[in-house]
Amino acid sequence: MQSQNSIQRFDSNGRLSRVVVYNGMVYMSGVTAKVKTPDVAAQTADVLAQIDAHLAQVGSDKSRLLRVNIWLHDMAHFEAMNRVWDAWVEAGNEPARATVESRLAGAGANLVEMMATAVL
């Protein structure tokens, strides 16, 4: 049995862990789309599906999200990203959120990146 204070790391690759669980908290690394389409809505849907999968992997779900930070390659994509987000987020369980424009890793292929914190 794991101690409540033990650190659990998931999907580690020598540089980072995709998910870290500590003391009932779930910390997620930045998630970018696996599909490299120029469509921010498709990339947003892919990122949110990955967040769902990461949360399920540790026994949590999007209703337990506390905070999500969102980086957009271009704020011109804000409304398109929000349409996908609004369809995904659960009414009454909206996390705290910040969205900023930023140059993202991936030589322009990444249009959106999200980092989430949740509870188990």
Image (cartoon, grey):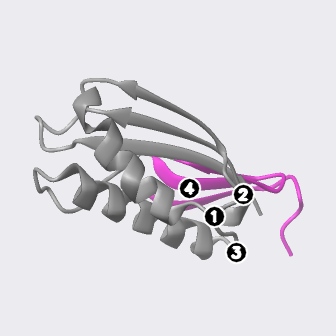
Q: Which residue is mark 2?
A: 93
Which residue is drawn at the image coordinates 69% and 69% (left, top)?
60
Residue 74 visible in the snapshot: no
Residue numbers of the magenta segment:
1-28
Which SS class for mark 2?
loop
- Dot 3 surroundings within 10 Å: few (below 14), some, or many (20 or more)? few
The verdict on residue 24 being magenta is: yes
Three-letter amino acid code of the residue under disc 4:
Val
**Marking on residue 59:** 3
Instruction: State the residue in front, 98 or 54.
Output: 98
Asked if the residues shown at circle 1 and circle 3 are in contact, with their CB atoms under 8 angstroms apart, the answer is no
Left or right: 116 with respect to 119?
A: left
Q: Which residue is mark 4?
A: 19
Asked if the residues shown at circle 4 and circle 3 are in contact, with their CB atoms under 8 angstroms apart, the answer is no
Which SS class for mark 3?
loop
Q: Which residue is mark 1?
A: 90
Camera-near label (1 vs 3) is 1
Which SS class for mark 1?
loop
- Dot 4 surroundings within 10 Å: few (below 14), some, or many (20 or more)? many
Q: Percent position (x, y) of residue 23?
A: 84, 52
Mark 2–mark 3 distance (CA, rounded to whole Å) = 17 Å
Which residue is drawn at the image coordinates 42% and 68% (left, top)?
49
Query: Which of the two labelled residues, at mark 1 and mark 4, occupies the earlier sequence position?
Result: 4
Three-letter amino acid code of the residue under disc 1:
Glu
Three-letter amino acid code of the residue under disc 3:
Gly
Q: Percent position (x, y) of residue 118?
A: 69, 53
**Marking on residue 82:** none
Mark 1–mark 3 distance (CA, rounded to whole Å) = 17 Å
